[in-house]
Image: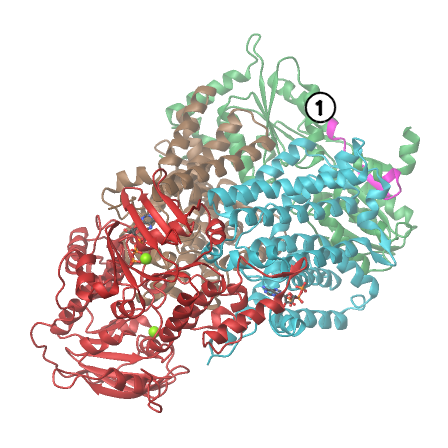
Chain colours: A green, B red, C brown, D cyan
Amino acid sequence: AVTTDSTAAESSAPAEQSTEASAAASAAEPAAGGAIKIGVSVADQSNPFYIEILDGMESAVQGDDQLIVMDAGFDAAKQITDIEDMIQQGVSVMMIDPVDSNGIQASLNACKAAGIPVVCYNSPVDDASLVESTVATDNFMAGQLIGEALGEALEGKGKVVMLTYNVAQVCADRANGFKDALSQYPDIEIVEEQEIQPGVDTAMPVMENMLQAYPDLTGVFALNDPSAIGCAAAVDSAGKLDQIKIVGVDGSEDGIAAIKEGKMFASASQDPVEIGKQSIEVAYKVIAGETVEADIKVPSALVTAETLQAGE
Amino acid sequence: MENEYYLEMSGISKTFPGAKVLDNIEFNVKAGEVRALMGENGAGKSTLIKILGGIYDMDSGQGTIRINGEEAKINTVQDAQHYGIGIIHQEISLAENMSIADNLFMGKEIKGGALLNDREMVRRSQAILEEMGLGVDARTKVRDLSIAKQQMVEISRALLSNAKIIVMDEPTSSLTKTEIDQLFLQIENLKKSGIAIIYISHRMDEIFEIADSISILRDGKMIGTDTVENLTQDKVISMMVGRELSEIFKRDGKIDVGEVCLEVKHYSNEKIRDINFSLRKGEIVGFAGLVGAGRTELARAIFGIDKVDSGELYINGERANIQNTQDAIRYGIGYVPEDRKTEGLFLMHTIKYNTSIVVLDKFIKNVGVNKKYENELIGKYADALSIKMTSPEQKVQFLSGGNQQKVVLGKWMAADPDIFILDEPTRGVDVGAKAEIYQLIYGLAKQGKAVMLISSEMEEIINLSDRIVVMHEGSVTGVLDNNETSRAKQEEIMWFASGGKENAKN
Amino acid sequence: MQKISENKIGVGSNPVVVFFKNNMGILIALLALCAVLSIATDSFLTANNLLTVLRQICINAFLAIGMTFVLIIGGIDLTVGSVVGASGVAVVMLMESGVAIAPAIIVALLFGAAIGLINGTIIAFTGMPPFIVTLSLMGSLRGLCYLITDGRSVASKNELFTVIGNGYLFGIPIPIYILVVTAVVMSILLYKTKFGRRMYAVGGNENAARFAGIKIKGLTIRVYMISGILSALAGIVLASRMYSGQPTAGDGYEADAIAAAVLGGTSFNGGIGTIGGTIIGALVIGILSNGLNLLHISSYVQMIIKGLVIILAVGFDILKNRKMARQ
Amino acid sequence: MQKISENKIGVGSNPVVVFFKNNMGILIALLALCAVLSIATDSFLTANNLLTVLRQICINAFLAIGMTFVLIIGGIDLTVGSVVGASGVAVVMLMESGVAIAPAIIVALLFGAAIGLINGTIIAFTGMPPFIVTLSLMGSLRGLCYLITDGRSVASKNELFTVIGNGYLFGIPIPIYILVVTAVVMSILLYKTKFGRRMYAVGGNENAARFAGIKIKGLTIRVYMISGILSALAGIVLASRMYSGQPTAGDGYEADAIAAAVLGGTSFNGGIGTIGGTIIGALVIGILSNGLNLLHISSYVQMIIKGLVIILAVGFDILKNRKMARQ
Ligand SMILES: Nc1ncnc2c1ncn2[C@@H]1O[C@H](COP(=O)(O)OP(=O)(O)OP(=O)(O)O)[C@@H](O)[C@H]1O
Ligand SMILES: Nc1ncnc2c1ncn2[C@@H]1O[C@H](COP(=O)(O)OP(=O)(O)OP(=O)(O)O)[C@@H](O)[C@H]1O
Ligand SMILES: [Mg+2]
Ligand SMILES: [Mg+2]
């Protein structure tokens, strides 16, 4: 009598389980005139990047349709419970930004059992067969973009530290893209890779210490804009902004401001609003039964003082 | 003076949930008078004092407190201080991490300008300590003082407060003769300067030595007040307990003393030096000495709480190696500690829980509680000790001091050891309960138990013991026989207790 | 004389009555919460949702039961969250390296016990404050966990393993069975053995416990080991739920475990606490987040509400008890 | 009779001697750490690096001084990190909405005081454990902070404001001046006023303090308010350093603040603690992370080491004191 979520709906499932599932499944068909509910499981709502994605989503929602948003607070286990709670409410489609690509498996199974299609956004899941589509920035490319920009700006030589957060796959992808780009510059030495907790206040003291350890540093990779801004604050108060070029990823409002002020050198923009918009569009297609592309990459663009000027 | 009383409390009642602890109390004290307040444990003495001190509110309505003829509204401790009331509370209440000076001036620190004047506080503290005959630096931390010295600090605090009314709630419970004499000297001085003193104690001899008059409380009611001249010990006791209590040390039947069951040889550690003594079955051996003589330390060493550096212990002739309390219990030793609150009781737990904690083996076998056996056990000892309680499920914290002490005794009686170490078993216990505890001690001896009785009450030692061991500064200075034919003399004990060198005062 | 205020530790007359009396405040809160949610949402009062909630609280309940043990002896265990992460990683890594499921689970549980042993030994032998010891080890253990995994999650390919957290038996999620068994075993340990009785003594008055011949050091160590084992159990179930060992898993879980225990009437000063109360506490916390989710309340507002509810519930309980004790 | 063991709170003979004696363990740890780092790295023993470290510890030192106050009265304040975040956001938002810098700072400090007032009032009047109260409010306050900012940071465009955290005066970073002034003021408050003396009394023996007529409730509330104000100060300096108010700032800072205080000899049981000790504690923690970074040690290993160092240092201290006290 032992079953798991993935099979519960199909095989010897308990009665209420299957009726609930079919109820949810029937709700998935846009009922005549009825508004639909779209479940959104956000990885971490304390990060503005994720909030901008949400803004993009809101902008693409049609009519009376409703977004049900839950915040996993970067806890893979809480994400599972959030998704369970949304399944209880009969959402028609589940938008998931997985905290962890493996850890999300139970939720994918649960959605499948309940007959709810899943659209992944921002980061991928391990078992892509369980999701209709994944809409995300090409993070490797983002890393490459800033890597190339930095390599060029340093004229092929210098010392670089990397502040990483490899706990998150997307951040690891960026770091790898960055290293890939820098591998073309043999005279640029990556003197240290240090894991940090992403954030302005957490990156700052680490950067300060790096400045002490490597007085002749010329470049910094930070896994995202908040961390890059923290680094910039440290470099700025050490009076070394001329000497050290800081690159980050996000192209966030704060990041762009920092670039304009000359504190950051470059950022690889992600377009969170676009990710949000596109993923909701995909979701509507899925509900309508249309086939969708399995892997939608929202391109990343380089943001520097020059591109900003050009844009104005 | 139109009004002869300096303090007048009238119509004071106090109800705790479910219990009326004070019932319409009338209590008046003159200036320059030492008024003893007596009563059994739980009679309401401390409660009355706490109302005076602003710690408890009296039941609203009828009661009034007048000081020097003026009505006094006392709602907080500050109010009480304002009216010149200084209290030495029953429990020692000092901040151990702070210096003596800090404790003496706690709540009434001296400032020089905007900031504290430590120099002055230390200077004044030192002066009062000298006056009390305490040879310690006022900057010593209270933690480093013995209990007796701590109690002396408490007393000094009240003296320092310039109070017009000083209440002493069992100030001598940890003191021995020398310190008590010091205290009485101070009380005489206070009396002379017209201060009203309320003195609570269970020690009859003290009361008759120091008090001018005695008020007696029973079950929350004021039974009466009279001058010492008009009262006798027996009369006071009968007023307290509501019946005659002819002979509190009365022992019926002779107890046979058997063979040696505990022998201590050359016990030494930092606190005790080369202790030798033995206990026989059915024997009560009293341990006398001044506070700080090392009796408690000896008991702790025997019971495996403190380390022993050298020496041997024999139980029933066999060498026993006691490393911890479990070992001691296994060898059939039980220890009723000196301080019931911190060492003896689980205040938040029930009487039942407290009495059964040492004997869990008897009704819990691996898994599963034999409730019936547990209840029988508790019933047996609660009866034997006549603990005043509403049920065995009552929490110990709501018992009066004497009844709490009985619970500790009950705990060890339930454990049924062969050797009892009783460390100040009647501290803070009223006469009635004392008499009961004495009977319990005889009962133990009759069953063939050996009893090591540590007490600072000379009466107790002389009247209960078959033999008396006297200690001084960690060593045994004398062993006295004490039976029907040759009663040890108090002077003799004091002589040994003060080192056997000089003649004891008194 | 005075009224007997009932006995918090459940050695009282009728255990069921005592239990209800002692936990009245939190029970009322629980019922009120359920009533409101039943009315305000369609989905709360469905068998399916209730089972979901029950499964959700399991992880916290394991930790909270262990925490209750530790709190009863007057300690605190902040390593529980790190043990969740480390044991989850451990069990999955072991299985991926070819160890069979049963021995892998046993080793992970032993690992939890080992952490408890370290906690308990340091606390018992040095007398350092448990808060400091376990706070420090919490960090160290988390660091170790990242170091071993290089910060990445480890996916489990063992089908059977994933059933533990995700499977059903007779329509009821398997973690619920594990919780029931755990609660029963722990209740027996706490109420029906000498060990349990002595825990209350050590927490009630350590000094008096020493005089009563209780081996405090050994007991302390064993209690922290139990907390470690239960945390490891939580970690295993969680890893199974997540099909992977996550080095970040369990971060901050100590707060909810403590909240559940305290909501359930466990005293922060030691000596008082029941397993039933703790489970109710865990239910309140679980139902609260489930309900707030069902009500579509934003996660920010949820954080605000959760804190306030805990303060209100505990505060109510304390004021009620004080009323009973004082007047 | 017994030896007069020296006085932890500094009423002993020569305060400097007493201070060194009391903090010997941690001072040795600090010196050893510095010695090792001076030898092992070129960069540690440079004026520049030492100033950097000093500036880094400022934030933690503010919190730790407040925490020391709270710990001395036997409490704990877990809201400090949330206050850092909230006050940083508050000060920047106020300035961005047109309020001048001085009133904005004052309002932010008052906000910190208000949180302390809430903490203190609940703790003093309900008797709830400070751990639970401040843990719950920590969550609520963080939620509030997210709610107000919608989770986004607020950039400060006020040049003058950013000088507070980033500026130099005579070659020394401004936060260091602020810390020195704070430490001096707080020391006077703690050692030279009735208020400070009474804090030790309340933490040492609450009953004794009550019997001595000390108004415990009022004192408790004021102490939590001081902690709140110092946390807000830390939040303001941090926001200035970051050129922005970050709603996530300060998350988890309470742990380091507690660690610094305890390393500096503050007792978890109340009644004991000094500001000098706490600052040394903060220095040890700051130098440790600085040094480990200079030694290129990975952050995972750093987490492990930090936990172990705290345990070793506090353990050493406790064992040393025990030796002195016992035999
Ligand atoms: N806070 C309280 N709550 C409930 N009952 C209390 C409280 N304090 C005291 N009592 C009860 O009030 C009664 C009087 O206690 P009180 O301490 O005044 O006695 P006492 O005369 O000082 O006794 P003792 O000689 O043992 O010190 C006792 O029955 C005690 O159990
Ligand atoms: N609890 C106290 N009681 C009496 N005096 C005190 C107390 N605490 C401090 N003092 C006095 O305050 C002064 C300074 O105290 P202390 O020796 O603790 O300073 P410190 O530790 O060097 O200062 P800081 O902690 O700021 O570095 C001394 O003159 C000391 O006597
Ligand atoms: Mg009394
Ligand atoms: Mg003694």
Q: Residues within 10 Å of mark 1 (few under 14, many from 20)?
A: many
Instruction: Judge whether residue A297 can be spotted in this image.
Output: yes
Say if B403 sits above or below B185 in the image.
above
Q: Which residues are magenta?
A: A259-273
Q: Quadrant of the C terminus of chain C?
A: top left
What residue occupies the far top of the structure in this picture? A32
Question: Of B144 and B151, which appears nearest the observer?
Answer: B151
Q: Residue at x 72, y 55 (%)?
A: D182
Question: Of A278 and A295, which appears nearest the observer?
Answer: A278
Residue A60's spot in the image, x, y percent?
69, 19
Say if A77 sits above or below B85 in the image.
above
* Residue C35 included in the magenta stretch of the image: no
Q: Residue at x 68, y 24 (%)?
A: A57
Which chain does the residue under circle 1 lie in?
A: A
Q: Going by the image, does C262 lie left or right of B225?
A: right
Question: Of D247 and C80, which appears nearest the observer?
Answer: D247
Q: Residue at x 89, y 33 (%)?
A: A308
What residue occupies the far front of the structure in this picture? B1
Residue D247's spot in the image, x, y percent?
69, 39
* Residue A268 included in the magenta stretch of the image: yes
Kind of residue at badge 1: Lys
Residue under numbered circle 1: A277
Q: Helix or strand or loop: what does disc 1 sit on?
A: helix
Instruction: Judge whether residue C88 can be spotted in this image.
Output: no
